[in-house]
Amino acid sequence: MKINLKQLWQKITSPLLFYVDKSGNSIFRNYCIYKNDGCFYSETFSIQKAGKVLEYRMELDKKLKRLIFLISFIVYLIFIKTDMTFLSFVVCEIVWLFAYFSFRIYFAYLYKNKLKSTFGDYKIVNFDPQVSKNKRSSFYYHFASRIVSVFIIILLFFFPALILFNIIKINLNSSKPSYKFAVGVSRVYGFLYPKTVMYYDMSVYAKYMIQDFEGALEDCKKSLEKSGIIFTKRDMTRFANLLYLTKKIYGSETAIEYFNDYITRKNMSLSQQIKMLWMKSMFSISGQITEYIEQDYDDLLLSLNKKDYKNRFYILCDKAYMYYLMGEYEKAIKLYNELIPYAQNNTKDFEKESHTLIVERGYAKRQNGDYISADTDFNSSGIELYDLEKYEPVLLEQNFIVQKF
């Protein structure tokens, strides 16, 4: 059936519920939207006679509007509670349409019974009153004003969201923040409004500070999920806190499992992959889970373009650093023996690194008991003796990181 959009628009915008045609027939508007939307009686009813039926129809319309508003609000709440995914949007849209048309069918049934009990049986026709151009224009204007009113109501509903969001933000950034207050306000916001990535980031911090570690972890995971597949600078902090919070609740092994799961959901550049592997390796060593570190670096090296010598060099430097922290001093020294000559032969790119690597090798030799060779490296590194300690590989313990909001 071909739908005439102009006629459909006219029917939607028209508020008329009853008319008498030129032949004296009375037509009541029913709840169909486009076709078969008229109930035909071959007699003339005065407005007074049709009044009770029309009043009943208007009461039904008021109830229908209230029900549609209620179901719309409920579906909206369901949608924001399901984190607003495309799938949840489709499901919520289907639920809303099903409820909307179910209510219309039910109210159509009630109105049909009212018409039959009052005036008897009717014939189905199209509801097509003859309306002047000026009156049609007034219908359009009235309908447009209703749309504007709905839009204003929606704006008024969401305006407090801006206020609540900024209350949380200002509170967390103040010199004397009240974390319990921030959590309380965030719960009010989260019940009524869509939760953004920034909302979850702030909630992680506030819940951590009141020692709700499980709540902070759940929000941290939500933040990673909602931030999308593109890796951003803030994701570095999110992953660091994911490791820290998971370790605090479930232990290091579960933390690594979560990390591996969420990291696969992100598209990262090579430099970002290198940084994330460094973070994961540091965490693994501190948790004494070192069996996969060497393989992780080998896998990253295999993913490189064969001509990408620069990044290969930096990854191998990180790998040697991790060997040292794991106590694999022989492996570290062997790798340093390969890296140092390469850096010295390419001083244009790696002059600074060549000095650092010699000192790191010196510390590895010292840990391995070769003090004479270690001192030789320290002396030949070109770094002042009182600065040498700054270059010793150090295991950095993971702590909770506070973001700026």
Image: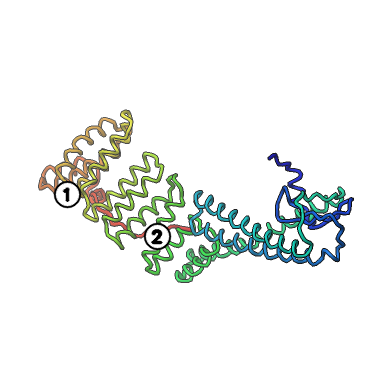
Q: Residues at badges 1 and 2 in contact (C-beta under 8 Å)?
A: no
The kind of residue on which mark 1 rests is: Gly
Image quadrant in which you'd find residue 272: top left
In the displayed structure, would residue 206 be above or below residue 332? below
- Name the colouring of the figure: rainbow
Q: Is residue 204 left or right of residue 355?
A: right
Instruction: Give the residue at x 36% y 56%.
Output: 242
Secondary structure state at the residue bearing disc 2: helix
Image disc number at residue 160: none
Instruction: Give the residue at x 21% y 41%.
Output: 358
Image quadrant in which you'd find residue 312: top left
Q: Is residue 309 left or right of residue 206?
A: left
Residue 104: give x, y in percent of width and height: 66, 58
Q: Which residue is mark 1?
A: 327
Residue 12 seen from this side: no
Front-lying residue, 117 or 243: 117
Q: Which residue is mark 2?
A: 218
Image quadrant in which you'd find residue 66: bottom right
Front-lying residue, 221 or 307: 221
The span from disc 1 to disc 2 (Cα, nearest Å) is 35 Å
